[in-house]
Amino acid sequence: MEFNATLRSVQGSSASRRLRHAGRVPAIVYGSAQPSLNIELDHNEIFHALRKESFHASILNMKIGDDSQQVLLRDVQWHAYKQLVLHVDFQRVDASKALHTKVPLHFINAEASPAVKLSSAVITHVLTELDVICLPANLPQFIEVDLSNVIAGSMIHLADIKLPLGVTYATHGGDANPLIATATVPAAKKGDDADAATGAETKA
């Protein structure tokens, strides 16, 4: 994905307020052993870009005039109650160095699973994104979690899904196999099934 930026010559809170009143957003680019770069963005452009999931988990092409740099979105500051972007942080990407970032999980085929079709189970997404380490060229926009074979009462862990080539999980606190999702039959459904079974036995 691509976005446009302009070099920002003035800094400080007063200058940032003036930028925001003019429909601009102050931002910074850092990393890759280069000096930090103060930039500004068009608010409408960056606001709509931030609504796209892929903008948060892709290598971005930042254009500044005739120059372009590859960057990764690192942080966004929003207004407390208005739909306004206050500040954005980007990190430069070095093709030869591994990235540590978050990638969203896409859960597919839940409706076709035995858990949902046969047992009316509820699929709960324990995690919605995964911390990963990979080279920029291997960074996926998302990771699929196929639920087509999940049965009621089961739990889906990281070991149950296949990570893309070149992507590894960034372990936290020694948990190398975190819980991803669960398939649980609601208590009310269990009670209905038990009542139905009792009724069938009585008739017999």
Image: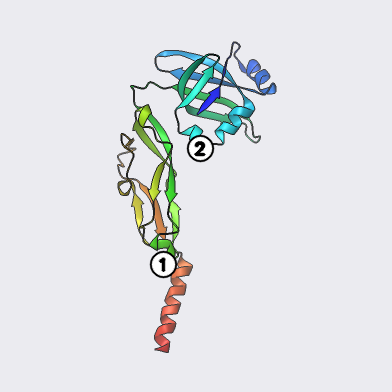
**Residue toward you, 170 or 117:** 117
**Horizontal relation, residue 97 to residue 122: left or right:** left
The residue furthest right is 21
Image spot of residue 50 (x, y percent): 55, 33
Residue sitting at x 41%, y 22%: 93
Q: Quadrant of the C terminus?
A: bottom left
Whether residues under marks 1 and 2 lie with C-beta atoms below 8 angstroms apart, the answer is no
User: Are there few (<14), some (14-19), or many (20+) residues within 10 Å of tag 1?
Assistant: few
Identified at 34% across, 31% down, the residue is: 134
| Residue occupying the point 51% across, 24% down | 89
Between discs 1 and 2, the one toward the N terminus: 2
Q: Secondary structure at mark 2?
A: helix
Q: Residue at x 48, y 14 (%)?
A: 36
Q: Which residue is mark 1?
A: 118
Q: Amino acid at mark 1?
A: Leu
Residue 41 placement: quadrant = top right
In the rendered image, which residue does mark 2 sit on? 53
Residue type at the position of mark 2: Glu
Residue 171: x and y, percent?
32, 37
Question: Residue most toward the top?
Answer: 9
Label 2 environment density (alpha carbons within 10 Å; few <14, some 14–19, many ≥20) = few
| Residue 143 sits in quarter | top left
Q: Nearer the viewer, residue 114 or 66?
A: 66
Taking 38 as reference, is 165 above or below it?
below
**Number of numbered callouts drawn:** 2
**Label 1: which secondary element:** loop
Looking at the picture, does residue 162 appear above or below residue 132?
Answer: below
